Amino acid sequence: MIRLRENTDLKEMTTFGLPALCGRLVEFSDPETDLPELDRQGILDGAVVLGGGSNMLFTAPAPDLTVIHPVNTGVRFSSRTEDTVIVTADAGVTLDDLCRQTCESRLWGLENLSGIPGHIGGAAVQNVGAYGAELSDAVESVTCYSLKSHGFVTFTKDDCRYGYRDSVFKHQHQDEMLIVCRVTLRLRVTPDLKLGYKGLRDALCEKFASGKNASFQADIEELTANGVSPMAVRETVVALRDSKLPAPSETGSAGSFFKNPVVTTGELERVISHWNEKEGNTHPLPYHITSDGMAKLSAAWLIDKAGCKTLAEGGAALWQSQPLVIVNLTGDATAEEVVKLEKAIIRQVESVFGVTLSPEVIHI
């Protein structure tokens, strides 16, 4: 079914809660019939897809913009083997609801992503991640409607070309637009703890292990032996998120606003040298080396140490317990204020560290 509304404010459909006027909002519930019809009518031309609105910033009113919004919410479990289960979720399924549902079914793969707002369709585009896991870890395939071929196409995980907060879906020309219809995941039946994030590992060990293990692998083995479930991991992740991130129902935000910068090891040495000259070794610069030999820095740490935490523009400010998050603190911030604050943070971090932050949030 297709539902069309003219001159709609998307404020209530985005987690930032900012005024966002569009010329036309088109909702669809049956991709197989609705999208070809919308394509035939030319309604998809120049349109923007809005899922859960958790990672988008509409920077100005757009009276000529058409916004496409999926409301299909089916979840199907199939192809169970001894080790895995295939789960297919429609694009309009809320990611956290899917995390809860799979954890209740004692399936491993989404538990670390619990609490992330938004829909599974948008999560597959953005390759969302948290606490040492990314959605791409579990993706089997993504089915889309292609504006270029005027038909449906299924991308394998390799076809998706996933990277850090990146995928093939973020690099399409407008006339090649891909609208995600459903995401197929391969989840594990047997325990598969992902404890690369130390805070999560420590929190789980405090509750479910002796805390005396000498190695990362020993912690995993003890937690597994003690029967830690996906739901236990989910509950721990949610508690960690709640301790430092604003509740979307109370304070508007788009979650992590900036990506963690990825630099060469040569650039890392320059940044460390510059910081040590300025600060000594009082606060060592945190980083980790990625699988491809690059160095990933902590954007939150850079923002904090650059002295940005007190920056504000009108109703837009940084969340004090997690400076990676720009919030609609007063409830009446504007997109213009958010963009001004974003630019001020980028300038200040660049002036202190010589590192340029890039937004994770998509600007429309």
Image (cartoon, rainbow, N blue to C red):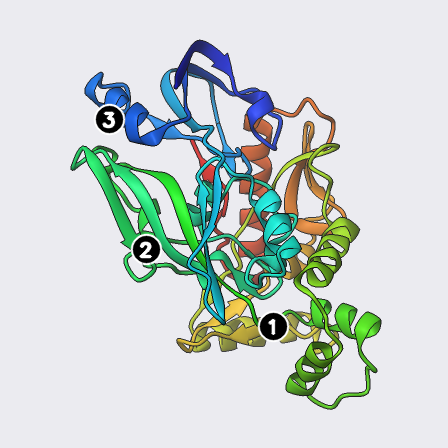
Badge 1 density bin: few <14, some 14–19, many ≥20, Cα 10 Å: some
**Of callouts 2 and 3, the N-terminal one:** 3
Residue 173 appears in which quarter of the rendering?
top left
Residue 189 appears in which quarter of the rendering?
bottom right
Viewer-closest of 149 and 170: 149
Identity of the residue drawn at 58% across and 66% down: 132
Question: Dots 1 and 3: beta carbons under 8 Å?
Answer: no
Badge 3 density bin: few <14, some 14–19, many ≥20, Cα 10 Å: some
Relative to 325, say whether 21 is above or below: above
Identify the residue at the far left of this view: 149
Identity of the residue drawn at 16% across and 37% down: 149
Relative to 98, say whether 34 is above or below: above
Q: Position of residue 338 (x, y in %)?
A: 58, 33
Amino acid at pointer 2: Cys
| Quarter of the N terminus within the rendering | top left
Identity of the residue drawn at 55% across and 37% down: 54
**Of callouts 2 and 1, the N-terminal one:** 2
Q: CA distance from mark 2 to mark 1?
A: 26 Å
Numbered circle sitting on residue 36: 3
Relative to 37, say whether 221 is above or below: below
Q: Nearer the viewer, mark 2 or mark 1?
A: 1
* Left or right: 309, with 211 as reference point: left
Q: CA distance from mark 1 to mark 3?
A: 41 Å
Tag 1 residue: 191
Q: Nearer the viewer, mark 1 or mark 3?
A: 1
Dot 1 falls on a residue whose secondary structure is loop
* Left or right: 281, with 164 as reference point: right
Residue 288 appears in which quarter of the rendering?
bottom right
Identity of the residue drawn at 39% across and 75% down: 292
Q: Position of residue 319 (x, y in %)?
A: 72, 44
Q: Nearer the viewer, mark 2 or mark 3?
A: 3
